[in-house]
Image (cartoon, helix red, strand yellow):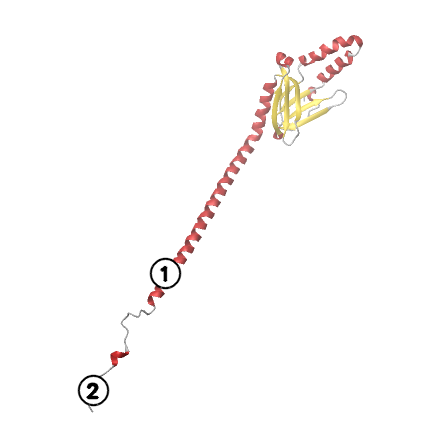
């Protein structure tokens, strides 16, 4: 590995896609303020501190993650995997817009605000585009699979609802048919009962009366 990245530990299949330090012109504001103050010895520490901070800051984008190394007397390395990146943005100051540098800010899922910032890097828009492409490439297959699974779940839910509705209609229809059968049976049985109408042809006792005068002894 290059001595420039002796602080960086990569996985076996991880490769460096982009690496840079803060843009040299980002030191201009520090020089504008520090040079006049150097005459009273106040500006010298400001100039030295700005220069050392600039030289000891590194930004790296690999195929798997984002890295940021800072520190002058000590070293701090921050790593964020693309799977955890939720949002990216970039910004430029007036001088940054004039000299072509700016900051790219990284926000993570579940985090509070900006978790990592590549400050004063050259062409921040291109760097943001690179990061977004890696995010889509890493999350693409999983996102497609999750989307297909969600669609299948919706279809199954609708099919279950249709099945329950159809089964409910069948049960209701069966109850109506049973009710109709009971009603028809009752009607048939009522038709078989004897007629009790008083106007019907009933046999009266008077039909059996005879004339006693015709009786011969």
Q: Quadrant location of residue 5?
A: top right
Res 144 visible? yes
Residue 9 visible in image = no
Q: Which residue is mark 1?
A: 184
Do the numbered discs 2 and 1 sit on residues whose CB atoms are within 8 Å?
A: no
Question: Who's the residue at 78% across and 14% down the image?
Answer: 45
Query: Residue 46 appears at what percent x and percent y?
Result: 76, 14
Q: Return the residue nearer the eye: 83 or 216.
A: 216
Where residue 116 appears, x then y in whole percent? 66, 25
| Residue, far right | 41
Residue beneath the point at 59% across and 19% down: 125
* 204 in relation to 20, above or below: below
The N terminus, quarter of image:
top right
Q: Quadrant of residue 110?
A: top right
Residue density around tag 2, few if under 14, some if 14–19, many if 20 or more, within 10 Å: few
Considering the numbered disc 2 on the image, is that residue within a helix, a strand or a loop? helix
As drawn, 192 above or below 131: below
Tell me the number on the disc at residue 201. Answer: none
Asked if residue 185 lies left or right of residue 19, the reply is left
Find numbered disc 1 in the image and state the secondary structure of the residue it sits on. helix
| Residue 146, image x, y percentages | 54, 36
Please report the residue visible at 26 percent of the width from the left and 79 percent of the height from the top: 206
Question: Residue at label 2?
Answer: 213
Q: Label 2 to label 1, Cα distance in Å?
A: 57 Å
* Residue 207, placed above or below residue 17: below
Q: Residue at x 75, y 8 (%)?
A: 36
Badge 1 crowding class, 10 Å Cα cut-off, few under 14, some 14 to 19, many 20 or more, is few
Q: Earlier in the sequence, mark 2 or mark 1?
A: 1
């Amino acid at each position: 590995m290059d001595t420039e990245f002796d602080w960086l530990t990569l996985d076996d299949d991880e490769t460096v896609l982009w690496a840079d330090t803060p843009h040299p012109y980002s030191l201009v504001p520090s020089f504008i303020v520090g040079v006049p103050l150097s005459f009273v010895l106040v500006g010298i520490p400001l100039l030295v501190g700005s220069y050392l901070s600039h030289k000891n800051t590194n930004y790296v984008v690999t195929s798997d993650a984002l890295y940021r190394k800072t520190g002058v007397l000590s070293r701090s390395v921050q790593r964020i995997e693309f799977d955890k990146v939720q949002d990216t943005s970039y910004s430029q100051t007036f001088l940054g817009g004039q000299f072509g540098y700016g900051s790219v800010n990284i926000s993570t899922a579940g985090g509070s605000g900006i978790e990592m910032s590549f400050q004063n890097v050259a062409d921040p828009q291109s760097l943001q585009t690179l990061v977004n492409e890696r995010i889509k490439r890493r999350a693409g297959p999983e996102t497609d699979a999750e989307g297909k699974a969600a669609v299948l779940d919706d279809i199954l839910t609708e099919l279950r609802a249709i099945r329950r509705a159809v089964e409910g209609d069948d049960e209701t229809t069966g109850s109506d048919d049973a009710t109709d059968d009971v009603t028809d049976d009752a009607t048939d049985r009522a038709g078989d009962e004897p007629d009790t109408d008083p106007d019907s042809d009933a046999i009266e006792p008077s039909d059996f009366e005879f004339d006693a005068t015709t009786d011969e002894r």
